[in-house]
Structure formats: C-alpha cells, structure tokens
Image (spheres, rainbow, N blue to C red):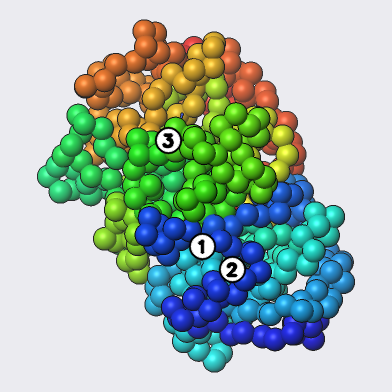
Amino acid sequence: MEALCRPDKTHWCDGSEAEKDLLTREAVSTGEITILDQKKLPGCVYHRSDPQDVARTEDLTFICTRSKEDAGPTNHWMSPADAYGKLGEIFKDSMKGRTMYVVPFVMGPIGSPHAKIGVQITDSIYVVLNNRIMTRMGKAALESLGSSGEFTRCLHGKADLNPKRRFICHFPEDNTIWSVGSNYGGNALLGKKCLALRIGSYLGKKEGWLAEHMLILGIEDPAGKFHYVAAAFPSQCGKTNLAMLVPPAAFRGYKVWTVGDDIAWLRVGKDGTLRAVNPEAGFFGVAPGTNKTSNPNALATIQKNTIFTNVLLKPDKTVWWEGLEAPPAEGGINWRGEAWTPASKEKGAHPNSRFTAPAGQCPSISPHWEDPEGVPISAIIFGGRRASLAPLVYETLSWAHGTYVGATIASETTSAATGKTGVVRRDPMAMLPFCGYHMGDYFAHWLEMGDKIQRPPKIFHVDWFRTDEEGNYLWPGFGENLRVLLWMIGRVEGTAKARKTAIGYVPETGSLDLSGFSLRPGALETLFKVDRGAWLKEIESQNEFFDKIGDRLPQAMKREQSKLKERLERDGA
Ligand code: GTP
Ligand code: SPV
Ligand code: MN
C-alpha cells in the first residue's frame, strides 16, 4: 500500500492518549479540526467537511464480487479487476506529502467470540480520531489479532475529495474494502457500514449469523426484570433516539438501557436465544433535533471527548444545531464555513451533521453492553418513516411473516445519503444500502436463521411518523415510545391483549398504556386503523420490488404476501 500511495511517512497507531494529543495538534495546525472551549466541552473538537462530502454516496458504493449476480439487483456492482484498477489509479501517489496511518481495530468486545478484526489504512487524521471512538483501536487490537489471524483489509484515502473520483468498493470474496475520495462517516470509517454491515452481512451468511442495521436496548421493569429488543429503522429514522429513551413521568419505575444505536450482530446463543452484540464502541449520531427534551442521554453523552462534524461553530467555541435550543444571538460559522446569523437562509448545521462520542459516556449505557456473548433478544422491531398505512404498532404472526414484513419496509429517504429526501422507497430490513450480497439470498438467510433459533423473538412493526392531513405527527414519539415497547414486552410475556387483524395483532383497546397522556381527538383511531384498500394497493406496489429481486426471492416471501392478501380479502380489516 505504501508503494501504491507513496506517503511521506507511515504511522502505526497504538491508540494511546499521547498519540491522540499528537494527532490532534497536527490536525489543528492544518485547520482540519478546531479545538472547542475546553472548560465547557473538555476533550471536544470540531470538524467541517468539504461541503460536497457530508453524507453517504450510495451511487458510488459498489459490491465487487466476481459474479455480478452475487451482488444482486439492489447493489451497484463492479468487477474486482475493474475496481482494483480504477481505484488503484486514484490511490496512486495520492498520499504524497501526507502521512499514512495504520489503524488496527476490533469490532465487538475484545475477546468476544462475535468480534471481528480489521486494519484500516488512511491518510485522514479525522478518520483516525473517529475510529478511536467508534472502534476498539490500536495496541489492544493488534494483540488481539496476533501474528496469523484473519482480518478485513481496509484501505482509505481522501485523494482530492472530488465526487467524480470517489468510490466505496467492497470485495467480500477478498475480505477487503477500498474507499477513496470521501472523508464522510459511513464512506470513510470503514469499520462501520463497510465492515460491520456490508462485509459483516456477507460473513454472516457464510458463517450463520446476521449483521443488521439495528439498535439494541434493554428494558428493566420496576421489579428488576429485563427484556432486550433490537430495532431496524432506516438511516435518520430514530434508532439513536429509541436506544436512549427516557421513560415519561407515568413510567418512573422503568429504566431503558442502551446497548447499541446503529448496528447489531445477531447469533444463536448456547441457550437457544437470539443474542445481540453491538460491534461499535461509540455513537456517530445525528445532531439536529437532539436536545434536552428529545434525547437528554445523547446530550449528556456529548459533553466531553466528542467530535462535532458540520454543526454551527459559535464565537465562544461551543457548538449549536437546529433544534438544540434557541439560536445563538451572536450567530457563528455555519457548516459551509460561512458567517451565519439566525436571519440567514442557509441552515447553521447540515441536516446530516453528526457527533462522535464514546458509548461508555452515555448515562443510560447498559452494564451488559460489552458482554462477550451478547444480550438475549425478546423482540425484533422493523419500522420506517411513512406518513400513512401501517398502524403505530402491530405484531407479526410468525418468524416467516415477520421476515416478509421486514423485507417490505418502505421509508422516506433522508439526508443521511446524497440525493432527493422524502422519497418513499423500499428499504428491506433498513439494509438496502448495507446488504453486501444478493437481497434474495439475504431474505433466504433470514428465514433459515428463524429455523435455528429455539427461542425466537417475536417480530413487530412500528411507524412513529404517521401524520394527519396537515402533516402533523399523530404520535408524539421519543419517550412516549416506551408505551409501545411495554405492549410488546406484554405480548412476549403473554399479558398484553391484542386484536387479530388481517395484517397481524394490534393492541386491544386499553392494552396500550396511555396513562398521564392525551392524544388529539381521532388520532388513536387513525393510528390503529387497518385500511383494507390501502393495504391491497401496498401489496401491488411490493410486487414491483419483488420482481426486481428476481428468481432468488424465496417462495416464502410470495407465500406470506398471498396469505396476507387472502386475509385482507376474506376478513376485511
Ligand atoms: P442513523 O444514525 O442515520 O442511522 O439514524 P438513526 O436511525 O439513529 O436516527 P436518529 O435517532 O438520529 O433520528 C433521526 C431523526 O428522527 C431526528 O431528527 C429525530 O429527531 C427524529 N426522531 C427520532 N425518534 C423520533 C420519534 O419517535 N418521533 C418523531 N416524530 N421523530 C423522531
Ligand atoms: C447511516 O447513514 O445510517 C448512519 C450514518 O448511521 S453513516 O455511518 O455515515 O452511515
Ligand atoms: Mn445508521
């Protein structure tokens, strides 16, 4: 890699504090990062990306398998030879005048049988400092690897950050990732979406486990009883917020514990339960909208040792974003690096601006978040951001039905990826941008996993984003989502009542605890209505997606769909 990229020097990262200080000083000297007020925000720094490099670029993301068919119809594909050739040209001499950093890292708790090792080469200090938070990085990782172990080879370079020369390529058959031309989170922190999801999902298929775009949380009831839940929502659809939920006043005796906010690795445990491990060590969370009411745990987490990216930099060297608190009267420097005042048309923070913070700093972090065997999952939740159709919550009828429901999630696109936002698209299991192999084979793998779990979790669907005709949310969301989680736990324990409908079980009137709380008139009826006509239309529109998957779509998916159609036609709603 040195011979290819020709760096001036190479630095092997040990992950020490001294190294962090050295890299921080170096990055400050070039303007790559700014030190924030160390009294108010100790250990915190600020970074602004190139304005053309503030989100994942799905169009420039490729799965490079030898056979195009294996990448499947939902991924962009390049042949390995073309990809190595094309990217090799861009990498060539690209680190002249720069330092090459070699970053060994572990995804998952060190020593856990679930953990995977990677080594990322990069010419970005910003990336090294982020990886330092997001993974277990440095000496411990190298020791964990030993002299002969398997690891994912990750090559990353900024090159000239030109989107025309930007490619994020995955070579699952070589356990290799090459990413060039972007310094943005999901494109550049290769342990995250590239390794833990795209390569991870491929390894999971091969080795019999699942790599999922899911948060993991624990719920402790007043008697001290625990249940763990894993939930898949597409990017910017509420994983971090749900993972850090604070119970509303009426539920003071309950506690929600955060295990992970973005990725879950799921395996069948020795006890026959489905076990979940968070492969990450930090949160790369959405800043806008985060405040002391919506997510007090996130706000507390990011008071120290945090990297703020593309938010507003205030003159007092603190940070601000839309939805944090009243805009700073004195303005600041916006995400584009321009002077900004509350009267400016441009946003202060980019809608996809982010914080990077150590998970261990979160007040709600679970005491079990680094358990090597993972936590046992009682319920899996699928959801999306969709203004109408699905009830607030429903329980699926079986693992196969749940797999079908996950496979057919649709959600509005968000600013986490470049391109138009607010467009409804199919995002199966919230993995459309992250599945490293053929989507039809992925569905088949989900079905096979169901057969292997002796004590399978129940599968639910939620939508926190239902709106009325004026576009107002019908459900307040955030902390109030606990009411829905508790209904699910009640279903798992056999105590919560449900009404069977054509689409699955919905809460029986009165079984969703609405104490100390009121919704607008008519909201509850809308939130739980099963609109037969709309569902029949939905089934039609799923076919377009199923046709795209082609002949690797498992028969069981079509079967579940026809059973749903039959139930709708027979029973109405
Ligand atoms: P990624 O990090 O991109 O994978 O996103 P995420 O799924 O973790 O999303 P996050 O929790 O950061 O939420 C994204 C946006 O959804 C923020 O603007 C939140 O304010 C909003 N949001 C989260 N939970 C809720 C909810 O329950 N109701 C409503 N209406 N909005 C929510
Ligand atoms: C997402 O887009 O789903 C994220 C942010 O979690 S990134 O890590 O950049 O992919
Ligand atoms: Mn994500």
Question: Mark 2 and mark 3: span between their CA atoms?
Answer: 28 Å
**What amino acid type should be assigned to the residue bearing mark 2?**
Val
Give x and y (percent) for residue 254.
20, 41
Residue 325 marker: 3
Give x and y (percent) for residue 24.
54, 71
Can you tell me whether the CB of the residue at mark 1 lies under 8 Å from the nearest atom of ligand 2? no
Quarter of the figure that contains the N terminus:
bottom right
Q: Are marks 1 and 2 in contact (CB under 8 Å)?
A: yes
Q: Residue furthest top?
A: 521
Query: Does dot 2 land on a helix, a strand or a loop?
Result: helix
Which one is nearer the viewer's eye here, 547 or 185?
Answer: 185
Residue 34 shown left or right of residue 548 in the figure: left
Which one is nearer the viewer's eye here, 72 or 132?
Answer: 132
Query: Does dot 1 land on a helix, a strand or a loop?
Result: strand
Residue drawn where x is 62% and y is 84% of the image: 11
Q: Which residue is mark 1?
A: 35
| Of pointers 2 and 3, the one earlier in the residue sequence | 2
**What amino acid type should be assigned to the residue bearing mark 3?**
Glu
Residue 500 in view = yes
Residue 234 marker: none
Looking at the image, residue 555 lies above or below residue 162 = above
| Of pointers 3 and 1, the one earlier in the residue sequence | 1
**What amino acid type should be assigned to the residue bearing mark 1?**
Ile
Residue drawn where x is 41% and y is 62% of the image: 38
Query: Does dot 3 land on a helix, a strand or a loop?
Result: loop
Which one is nearer the viewer's eye here, 180 or 116?
Answer: 180
